Image (spheres, helix red, strand yellow):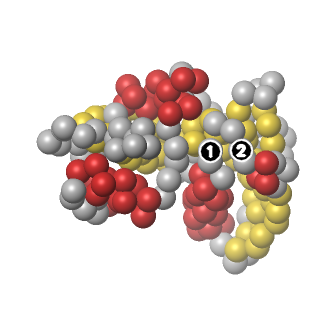
Amino acid sequence: MGDGTDGVLVEEFVYGDDHSAVGLCGTIWRPGQRHWQGAASFSRALRTDPVLLARVAPVGRDRAGEVFHRLSGARLPDEAALRSGYFDYEPFPAVAPLRLGLSDRTYRVLFAKDLTASGAGLSGRLRVGGDVFDWEVRRVGLGIAWALDVTVELGADADGNVRLVLSELTEIMRRQGLIPITTERFA
């Protein structure tokens, strides 16, 4: 194989009604396996073990498909088939949002790994329908993680755009080399 790639991990966060992460589903495939396997213990270890974390590279579906084909000779299953292989569900502890006295909603998406130099200090503002999203990327936890902080001024569209924007911003950060850990709601 040459590049040290030894498998494909597919994960998906499960979100609650308030758009915070309430759990994680996943499946993993390694050469020599006939079937996809449950990935909860691997996913947990990935987020806490720096050696294991260093071996994992977040990639999009196209790149994952190329790697899977190179390792197996087969096509990467479609999303429905992959989701049917989510044997493990790792629930996150249920906690109420931390109320900071803000009228707007504030979300924090935490990430592991190192951000590319061009990604540090990213921030922006966007309007989607009647909602306004301000976001900023910063180092947190004495430099052990990255956070994407998103403040939402809800307009007439209410909740309709929150999940979409959080998902899009999380994907942008994944393309910067980060691995999402969780999404929390603060207000």
Circles 1 and 2 in contact, beta carbons < 8 Å: yes
- Could you say whether the residue bearing mark 2 is in a helix, strand or loop? loop
Residue at image coords 52%, 44%: 57
Q: Quadrant of residue 98?
A: top right
- The reply, left or right, for residue 170 in relation to residue 45 is right
Residue picked out by circle 1: 178
Percent of width and height locating residue 81: 24, 57
Residue nearest the viewer, comparing 70 with 79: 70
Percent of width and height locating residue 141: 77, 26
- Could you say whether the residue bearing mark 1 is in a helix, strand or loop? loop
- Pointer 1: residues within 10 angstroms few (<14), some, or many (20+)? many
Position of 113 relative to 74 (above/below): above
Residue 174 appearing in the image:
yes
Q: Quadrant of the C terminus?
A: top right
The circle drawn on residue 39 is none
Residue picked out by circle 2: 115
Percent of width and height locating residue 36: 23, 42
Percent of width and height locating residue 127: 76, 73
